[in-house]
Image: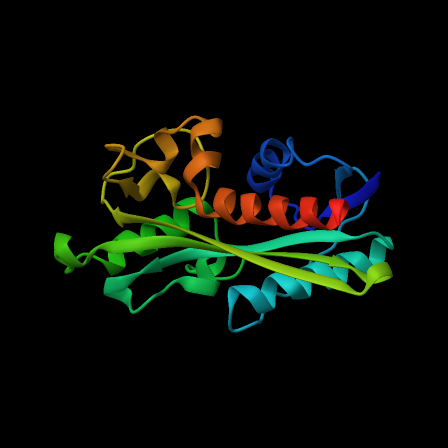
């Protein structure tokens, strides 16, 4: 059994990771909180991949265990791809979800519905220093931004992220539904396949 640390202190992500990791055989996942570790990694990369790898390496060094980290965010076409890697800090350092959502909607006041297309994007990085192994997988989920929030599930921008194919926002999906279609879910499925292949090769 290979013990792996989820390199996040975001409770929403931890809930999603716990669901997504269920089918992965041969790996035991723990959180930084489980290990009694508080670690704040500065996410100053220019891409999701750079931030995810930086977090995975930092956590692996501190814990001595393999680490799995993601960096994810929202890209809005009318905003030139913003907030992107600054999604968690769109309204400033330590901004709340409500503050980030308020800035998002304020930024789109003059945008027509046709250009409110957006996507959630995720890069997932697995790092195992003992094996000299670094793996990256990606996932994306397309939608549009709506002014009025709906739904109480999820976190972040989920209440404003409309999924036309489902007729609801991301925040209106149950956890299992979200895991099946979300950017993080798709990146995780790809990672599960990659790690499973490693275990069986």
Q: Which of the 4 quarters of the picture holds residue 159?
A: top left
Residue sitting farthest toward the front = 201
Task: In the rendered view, tell whether residue 176 sits above or below residue 74.
Answer: above
Q: Is residue 103 left or right of residue 201?
A: left
Q: Which residue is pictured at 58% across the width and 36% down the height?
A: 20
Task: In the rendered view, tell whether residue 78 sits above or below residue 32.
Answer: below
Q: Is residue 77 left or right of residue 180?
A: left
Looking at the figure, which quarter contains the N terminus?
Answer: top right
Q: How many marks on residues? A: 0
Q: Is residue 30 left or right of residue 173?
A: right
Q: Which residue is pictured at 83% across the width and 52% down the height?
A: 65
Which percent across, then down, holds residue 101?
Answer: 36, 49
**Front residue of this view, candidates 110 and 21:** 21
Q: Is residue 41 visible?
A: no
Which percent across, then down, holds residue 45?
Answer: 57, 72
**Front residue of this view, candidates 112 and 141:** 141
Q: How is the image coloured?
A: rainbow
Q: Which of the 4 quarters of the picture holds residue 124?
A: bottom right
Task: In the rendered view, tell whether residue 106 sits above or below residue 182.
Answer: below
Which percent across, then down, holds residue 46?
Answer: 51, 73
Q: Which of the 4 quarters of the picture holds residue 156?
A: top left
Q: Is residue 28 visible?
A: yes
Q: Which residue is pictured at 14% across the width and 52% down the height?
A: 113
Which percent across, then down, holds residue 185?
Answer: 50, 42
């Amino acid at each position: 059994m290979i013990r792996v640390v989820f390199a996040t202190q975001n409770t929403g992500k931890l809930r999603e990771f716990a669901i997504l990791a269920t089918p992965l055989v041969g790996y035991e996942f723990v959180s930084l909180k489980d290990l009694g570790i508080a670690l704040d990694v500065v996410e100053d990369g220019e891409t999701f991949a750079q931030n995810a790898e930086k977090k995975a390496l930092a956590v692996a060094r501190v814990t001595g265990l393999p680490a799995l980290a993601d960096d994810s965010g929202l890209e809005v076409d009318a905003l030139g791809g913003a907030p992107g890697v600054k999604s968690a800090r769109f309204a400033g350092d330590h901004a709340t979800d409500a503050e980030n959502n308020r800035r998002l909607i304020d930024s789109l006041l003059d945008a027509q519905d046709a250009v409110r297309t957006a996507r959630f994007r995720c890069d997932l990085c697995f790092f195992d220093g003992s094996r000299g192994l670094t793996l990256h997988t990606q996932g994306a989920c397309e939608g549009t931004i709506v002014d009025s929030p709906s739904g109480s599930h999820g976190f972040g921008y989920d209440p404003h992220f409309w999924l036309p194919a489902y007729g609801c926002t991301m925040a209106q999906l149950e956890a299992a539904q979200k895991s099946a279609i979300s950017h993080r879910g798709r990146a995780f499925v790809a990672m599960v396949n990659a790690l499973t292949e490693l275990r069986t090769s």
